Image (cartoon, rainbow, N blue to C red):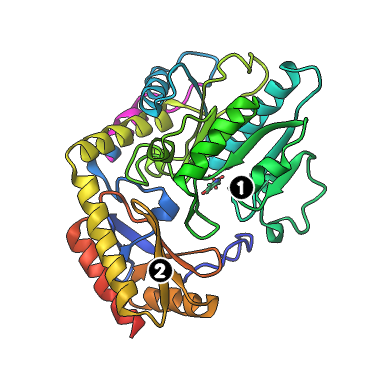
């Protein structure tokens, strides 16, 4: 650890084995994983279908560069477009959420340059949002605490307090609005469906792009393939990453603006390589079947009941349950209570996440079993006593 830069406050544990939502440390203690590596390991640890797809691909071609055709990349793009419900759309592949959002911003900026008399370049994002750690996605992130030390930032970002405030922030240079439908890092705060639909309509009328950051909410996290499907909207640009590769790094941008970027405008060395896209295809196929069999909806309901029960049982600690699908939080009465709970749950060997200032966040593998949920909540309760 001494050779690592000090960017994380890590728990002092080494996991050596994983199976679905269960992890084992080197002393053979088992932990229930309600985090899935921050919403990444969507099909669980050690998933056999995913690992054999990755192994088979790794034995052949891992990477060749985007100078040549990559069949699994083409197949994955087709799947993403068809499942997104966006109609005629195209995909760009990269390696992370921040990169996907950078790509979305570049598409918006170029669109704003070539489609009007004056250059439109301003992007409105929301307070309490999270869009990534690169210089411009950090600036897009509406949380000033992240901005300290790293300026100067690129121009053209404006923050709205909430959905209703977006219209007030629009001017003749506004090219796009970028938002999460459920703010994840900000505390698991879903926006109102009708408000979002009205916003989408208003933006369309004004020819302002809607970019939905689905890096956390995408790939069935909310119970639907995309949160945009759940909300019934068709954004101009959707960004994906976390759950898409089941742990293999991959980001993607789906957009109906298929003719904005031209060869040379944008690229990525690793983006969309054989290994990552082969993995993502398998993840989507596993989850498509899982959703179709109604198992996903069942597990979501089961998990939700447990959260509601625990919130009722400990009204002195919890205020309410928030979120959709398997992107949930228990909101605590204070950040002190929250921090104490997260510390104690780790001692009881169940992994949970913090989000915002008062939320205990739950992003379990979508394939978590009833038994793992029961065990996790038993341990969570033990931590609350
Ligand atoms: C995690 C996250 C990001 C950043 O993704 P990275 O892969 O860490 O770059 C961006 N937007 C949202 C909504 C996220 O949850």
Q: Position of residue 35 (x, y in %)?
A: 39, 58
Instruction: Report the label total.
Output: 2
State the SS at label 2: strand
Residue found 61% across the figure and 26% down from its top: 205
Instruction: Give, as a single range, the part of the protein colored magenta.
Output: 51-64
Judged from the image, the secondary structure of the residue bearing numbered disc 1 is helix
Q: Residue furthest bottom?
A: 385
Residue 382 image offset from top left, x and y in percent: 29, 81
Instruction: Between residue 206 and residue 144, name the one nearer to us.
Output: 206
From where the camera sits, is residue 137 visible? no
Disc sitting over residue 320 in the figure: 2
Q: Name the image quarter holding residue 128.
A: bottom right
User: Horizontally, is 101 left or right of 148 in the view?
Assistant: left
Of residues 156 and 46, the one drawn nearer to the viewer in this rendering: 156
Residue behind label 2 places its C-beta within 8 angstroms of ligand 1: no
Give the image location of residue 55, x and y in percent.
Answer: 31, 35
Q: Nearer the viewer, mark 2 or mark 1?
A: 1
Cα gap from disc 2 to disc 1, whole angstroms: 24 Å
User: Dot 1 surroundings within 10 Å: few (below 14), some, or many (20 or more)?
Assistant: few
């Amino acid at each position: 650890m001494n050779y690592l830069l000090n960017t994380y406050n890590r728990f002092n544990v080494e996991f050596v084995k994983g199976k679905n939502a269960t992890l084992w440390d080197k002393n053979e203690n088992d932990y229930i994983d309600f985090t899935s590596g921050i919403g990444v390991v969507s099909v669980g640890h050690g998933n056999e279908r995913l690992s054999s797809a990755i192994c088979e691909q790794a034995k052949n071609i891992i990477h060749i560069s985007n100078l040549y055709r990559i069949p699994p990349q083409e197949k994955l793009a087709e799947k993403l477009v068809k499942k997104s419900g966006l109609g005629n759309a195209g995909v760009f592949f990269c390696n992370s959420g921040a990169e996907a959002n950078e790509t979305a911003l570049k598409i918006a900026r170029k669109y704003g340059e070539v489609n009007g008399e004056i250059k439109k370049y301003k992007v409105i994002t929301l307070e309490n949002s999270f869009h990534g750690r690169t210089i411009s996605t950090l600036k897009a992130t509406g949380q000033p605490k992240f901005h300290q030390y790293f300026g100067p930032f690129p121009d053209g970002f404006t923050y709205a307090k909430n959905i209703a405030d977006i219209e007030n922030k629009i001017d003749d240079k506004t090219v796009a609005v970028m938002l999460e439908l459920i703010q994840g890092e900000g505390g698991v705060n879903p926006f109102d469906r009708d408000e979002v639909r009205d916003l989408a309509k208003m933006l369309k009328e004004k020819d302002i792009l809607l970019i939905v950051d689905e890096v956390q909410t995408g790939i069935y996290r909310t119970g639907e393939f995309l949160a945009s499907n759940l909300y019934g909207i068709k954004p101009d640009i959707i960004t994906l990453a976390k759950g898409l590769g089941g742990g293999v790094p991959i980001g993607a941008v789906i957009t109906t603006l298929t003719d904005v970027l031209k060869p040379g405008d944008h690229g990525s060395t690793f983006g969309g390589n054989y290994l990552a896209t082969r993995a993502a295809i398998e993840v989507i196929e596993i989850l498509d079947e899982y959703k179709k069999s109604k198992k996903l909806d069942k597990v979501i309901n089961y998990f939700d009941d447990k959260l509601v029960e625990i919130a009722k049982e400990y009204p002195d600690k919890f205020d309410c349950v928030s979120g959709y699908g398997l992107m949930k939080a228990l909101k605590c009465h204070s950040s002190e209570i929250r921090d104490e709970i997260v510390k104690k749950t780790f001692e009881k060997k169940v992994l949970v996440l913090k989000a915002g200032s008062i939320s205990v966040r739950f992003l379990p593998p979508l394939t978590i079993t009833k038994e793992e949920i029961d065990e996790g909540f038993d341990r969570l309760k033990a931590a609350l006593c």
